[in-house]
Image (cartoon, rainbow, N blue to C red):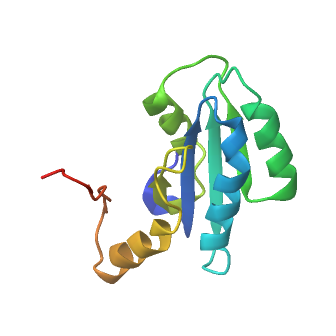
Amino acid sequence: MQTLDKLGPGVSVVVPVYNSGAGLPELVERIVRELEGRGDYEIIAVNDGSRDDSLAVLLKLASRYPRLRVIDLAKNAGQENAILAGFSILRYGYVVCMDDDLQHDPADIPRMLDVLIEKDLDIVFARFVQSGNAP
C-alpha cells in the first residue's frame, strides 16, 4: 500500500458494501453530485460478501460512473476489513469512509473536506446530532 504522502491531492471515498443493492444507485449518485467539479475523486466500493445483488449493481454503476472502483471480497470479512481493502488501492490522499445505507449524508463530504483543508488538520470526524428526547 502506498503511503498517504505519495498519493494524489484528490479525494477517495471508501464504502464497505453488504447486502445493500437497492440503495447503491442513490448513494453513488449523491456522492458523485457532491464531488463533481471539486477536483479529482474516486469512489471505492468494497463488496463484503453480499448475498443480494450488490455486486451486480456495483458493476452496472461502475460502467456508468468511471470514478467508481469495485472490489469484491471472496467472503464476508467485516466492515473494518472491507475498509482496509479499500485503503489498499487508494489513489488520493484525502480519504472519506462512509456506510452504504445513507446514514452518512454525502452532502457532509464537502463540508468536512473544507474544514480539514482550511484548518490544516490531519483528521475530521462527524458525529450524529441526536434529536427527540435524547439528552
Instruction: Please tell me whether residue 119 is drawn above or below residue 54 in the rendered image.
Output: below
Say above or below: 78 vs 61: above
48 or 127: nearer the viewer: 127
Residue 74 vs 45, above or below: the answer is: above
The answer to whether residue 7 is visible is no
Q: Nearer the viewer, residue 89 or 38?
A: 38
Residue 112 image offset from top left, x and y in percent:
39, 70
For the point 62% across and 62% down, the residue is 31
Q: Residue at x 52, y 49 (%)?
A: 2
Task: Report the side of 86 relative to 125 (left or right).
Answer: right
Where is residue 12, by image quadrant?
Answer: bottom right
Q: Nearer the viewer, residue 90 or 43?
A: 43
Q: Residue at x 48, y 67 (%)?
A: 109
Question: Is residue 76 among the parts visible in the rendering?
Answer: yes
Vertical position of residue 45 compared to residue 36: above or below: above
Q: Which residue sits at x=32%, y=59%?
A: 126
Which x, y percent locates residue 93? 49, 62
Which of the 4 image quarters holds residue 113? Answer: bottom left
Residue 72 pos. (x, y %): 70, 30
